[in-house]
Image: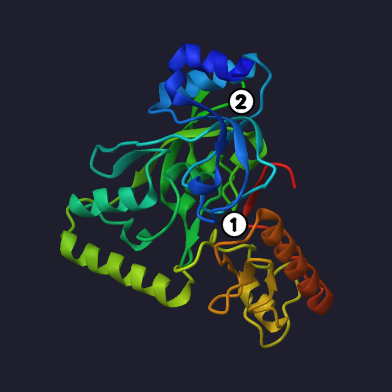
Amino acid sequence: MNTLSAALAAAFGAERIHTDAPLAPLTTFKVGGPADVLFEPANSDEIMRALSIARAMGQPVTMLGGGSNVLVSGRGVRGLVIRPRGGAVHAVGDHLVRADAALTINGLVRWTINRGYAGLEAWAGTPGTVGGAVYGNAHWQGTNFGDLIESVRLVTPEGKLLQAPADRLEFAYDYSRLKRTGEIVLWAALRVTPGADPAPLRLVARQSLAFRKQTQPLESPSAGCIFMNPDPLRDRIPEGVAPSAGALVDRAGLKGLRVGGARVSPAHANFVISDGTATADDIKTLIEQCRAAVKDQFGIVLRDEIICVGEF
């Protein structure tokens, strides 16, 4: 047991601290190496204590939510990986619900539908957690997650607690200020409309799920969309091509392209899927081949939507 794991074990119990812990099973890609140390806190207080211990020991910290939208290096992740578990949601007045960062988006959607709160039902089927959706300002059918948020409770890398209103979070396409500051979400307050009939809300949720199944390769391990869509104000989109990363990868003739066990999905060209044998390096190599081909053919440099974690 190393010094970091020993300090965490003293604080939380040795049975809750995992060294050389496999991360692949904790991601939707099902690839990647181990964490030096893995801790799964049950609440915000435990997150704060673990951050304080790692900070005092000069150890890097990586937050891991639902494991979607990430590619973990086969070389693993140094320092401490914190993977919050559980999470609760409750109403705050009539028009807000407060959801812990560890809560899954699907769990949040179910909670609101069952209690007749409208506004989140179309997000059914969205992978990941509330914290991850805030961090990357997740988007679905023209709506950004940040559009739904009233405020967020954060902890800074220095351990300071603060509450930030949505207009201070620098929300943009696939972006929040958390990517710049390293702040960590503890909970988010989201705007909802009370008094709705749950039946039509469930219908919207089912329609959203059906659309995802029709348009996305959900039967294979993936991490969601690999690239951000191009910026129509900055990038010159070829005539006749939709302003989307998937359309550019498709037009470049890359659907079905394979590196090892990784493949560009024939169903959606902005998805890379694994046949179960892919390594993180296979996936990263394929991503870079797609980026290079689109740049060569169209002069557009695709930006990552996926987050690469660890050493590549």
- Foreground of the two, 30 or 122: 30
In the picture of the structure, the residue carrying the numbered disc 2 is: 157
- The part of the image, by quadrant, that contains residue 304 is bottom right
Q: Residue at x 67, y 88 (%)?
A: 240
Q: Measured along the vertical axis of the image, is residue 185 above or below residue 214?
A: above
Q: Determine crowd level at label 1: few under 14, some 14-19, many 20+ residues with C-alpha closer than 10 A.
A: some
Mark 1 element type: loop
Mark 2 element type: loop
Q: Measured along the vertical axis of the image, is residue 4 above or below residue 218?
A: above
Give the x, y percent position of residue 102.
41, 39
Q: Earlier in the sequence, mark 2 or mark 1?
A: 2
What's the coloring here?
A: rainbow
Question: How many marks do you count on the picture?
Answer: 2
**Cα distance in 3D space between marks 2 and 1:** 24 Å
Q: Measured along the vertical axis of the image, is residue 150 above or below residue 42?
A: below
Query: Residue reaching furthest bottom?
Result: 240
- The part of the image, by quadrant, that contains residue 88 is top left
Tell me if 49 is positioned left or right of 174 in this view. Answer: left
